[in-house]
Image (spheres, rainbow, N blue to C red):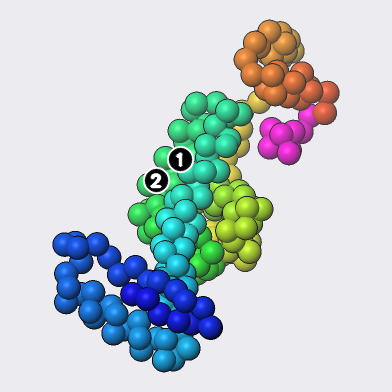
Amino acid sequence: MNYRFGGKQKTLALGVYPEVSLKEAREQRDEARKRIRNDIDPQELKKAAQTAQVEAVTHSFEAVVLEWFTKNTDVWTQGHARTIIRRLELNVFPWLGARPIASIKAPDLLAVLRRVEERGARETAHRVKQICGQVYRYAIATGRAEIDPGAGLHGALAPAKSKRMATITDPQKIGALLWAMDGYEGRLITRCALRLAPLVFVRPGELYS
């Protein structure tokens, strides 16, 4: 369909026969003429709709998660990577995966976390919230979101039940532990952490931060 808009000659593609019937093409032409009369460029409107469709796929929560996940798998252990993606697949994707990541608000995320909490998995709920926070930091950095909805959920979840961690008090066993830590030959970052831990006596999470 040839038309003029803003003093310029333009062409709007209505489709390819026989996928688009003559009747459908006429209906699209009539609709385009109405938009032109209302000072709306049908070609630009079509481009905007196509862009929105692409963004709906590439900017969905699940798409951003998978992009973030792929960029981190080379620094995670396989077990840690499996745990991360499994928690999201089971607890978040079914409800929020297809939604644009920027459209998810604090109540939406809280509803998902409450489902986890209500089945008695309080610690998992807190872990999932933590993972979502990492995803949102990546989304903000890449221009797909402006805020982390989980940042406003402090205190909204029941505290995870604390567990007392057993400790070694026998000096001989402590020596064996230090030798085992010194002999570890895995990832470089873990080797460095194991060598630093006995010198600073902080929790693992504080050491890695």
Task: Identify which residue is drawn at 62% across, 15% down.
Answer: 186
Pointer 1 local density, CA inside 10 Å: few below 14, some 14–19, many at least 20: some
Location of residue 18 with respect to 38 vertically, above or below: above
Residue under circle 1?
A: 85
Residue 201 place in picture, x, y as percent: 79, 29
Q: Which residue is mark 2?
A: 89
Q: Is residue 202 magenta?
A: yes
Magenta-colored span: 201-209
Q: Residue 114, can we see it?
A: no
Residue type at tag 2? Glu
- Label 2's element? helix
Specify the amino acid type for callout 1: Ile
Residue at 50% over, 47% down: 65
Real-space CA distance between mark 2 and mark 1, rounded to the nearest whole angstrom: 6 Å
166 up-or-down from 30: above or below:
above
In the rendered view, tell whether residue 202 sits above or below residue 189. below
Report whether 76 appears left or right of 171: left
Quadrant the N terminus occupies:
bottom left
Residue 126 x/y as whole percent:
54, 51
Q: Residue furthest right?
A: 199
